[in-house]
Image (cartoon, rainbow, N blue to C red):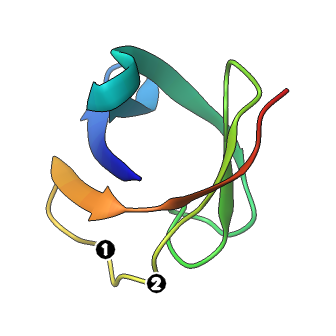
Amino acid sequence: MKITVRDTPKGMEVYVAKKDLEELIVASEKPGVWGGWARLSNGWTFAMPDLDAPKLPITVDARRLSVE
């Protein structure tokens, strides 16, 4: 699933265009969210690609692991 990750004053945020969804990242497996899982404020969890501190905003292909 294509998602856009951007930095906001509240923290890192994910935008999912196909779902018209904007949610904050509230937890992650690794600092900086890259290379592990990232949980959104709505409960969705994504497997994030392993990147070395990319310039934000960036659109990446991430796999959704759960829907709560």
Which residue does the numbered mark 1 point to in the structure image? 53
The amino acid type found where label 2 is placed reads Asp
Q: Residue at x 29, y 37 (%)?
A: 7
Callout 2 secondary element? loop
* Left or right of residue 61, residue 49 in this image: right
The amino acid type found where label 1 is placed reads Ala
Q: Is residue 68 above or below residue 2?
A: above
Q: Which residue is drawn at 56% across and 79% down?
A: 35
State the image coordinates of residue 64 (x, y, percent, origin top left). 62, 52
Q: Residue at x 40, y 21 (%)?
A: 19
Which residue does the numbered mark 2 point to in the structure image? 50
State the image coordinates of residue 30 (x, y, percent, origin top left). 67, 69
Asked whether 62 or 50 is in front, the reply is: 62
CB under 8 Å between discs 2 and 1: no
Q: Few, some or many C-alpha atoms within 10 Å of disc 2 (few <14, some 14-19, many ≥20)?
A: few
Callout 1 secondary element? loop
Q: Residue at x 46, y 76 (%)?
A: 49
* Left or right of residue 51, residue 36 in this image: right
* Left or right of residue 64, residue 18 in this image: left
- Quarter holding the C terminus is top right
